[in-house]
Amino acid sequence: MSRRKRRNRPQMAAIDQINVTPLLDLVFLLLIAFMITMPLMEYGTSVKTPEMNSGSLPQENLVTVELTKDGTFMLDREMISEENLRIKLKEMSTRDPKPELLVRGDGERSYKSVIELLALVRNCGFENATLVTQAESNKQ
């Protein structure tokens, strides 16, 4: 039996060069696939908004804040300035029990103005104000 003489070469010396061509092919393939599919995922999504059919509104201890089409504020169907609205809401938020607050914004108003009204309500101490909407009609 003859013994083969082992060469004392380090492991890394056996690999002279690394072939990166398959790796580059894979990277370019993935890049092209993502470049093609990302715009389709972003713009191809169909969003169907839920209908706003909720339960009945509370009948007792109820306060309504409205933002009309022309931008005026109303508190329980009475016209009020923004500063007076802020004062009255802070006063109401300290009552016991705290009244239920309903916020109505006209559909013609911008989204920003309704959000600003909700921020005003929240800053006055009403954490859980209800945003009132109309029920959507079934269009088919």
Image (cartoon, rainbow, N blue to C red):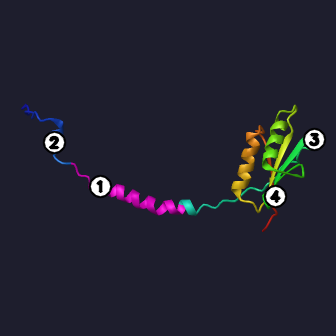
Residue located 81% across and 58% down the image:
68
Q: Gap in Å between the C-alphas at discs 2 and 3?
A: 85 Å
Decide if residue 60 is in sight here. Answer: yes
Disc ID at residue 60: 3
Q: Nearer the viewer, residue 134 or 129?
A: 129
In-image side of 32 versus 82 (left or right) = left
Which mark is first along the chain, 1 or 4?
1
Neighbour tally class for label 2: few under 14, some 14-19, many 20 plus, Cα within 10 Å: few
Identity of the residue drawn at 74% across and 55% down: 50
Q: Nearer the viewer, mark 4 or mark 1?
A: 4
**Which of the two residues, 41 or 52, is positioned nearer the viewer here?**
52
Residue type (three-letter) at the residue carrying disc 1: Pro
Question: Residue 70: where, in percent of width, then height?
Answer: 79, 61
**Which secondary structure class fits the magenta region best?**
helix
Residue count near mark 1 (Cα–Cα under 10 Å), binned few <14, some 14–19, many ≥20: few
Give the residue number, with chain letter if any, for mark 4.
Answer: 68
Q: Residue at x 91, y 40 (%)?
A: 61
What element does badge 4 sit on?
A: loop
x and y percentages locating residue 43 in the rendered image:
57, 63
Residue type marked 2: Ala
Question: What segment is highlighted magenta in the picture?
Answer: 18-40
The answer to whether 73 is drawn above or below residue 98 in the figure is below
Residue tagged by mark 2? 14
Side (left or right) of 39 relative to 59: left
Q: Amino acid at mark 3?
A: Glu
The reply to whether residue 53 is visible in this rendering is: no
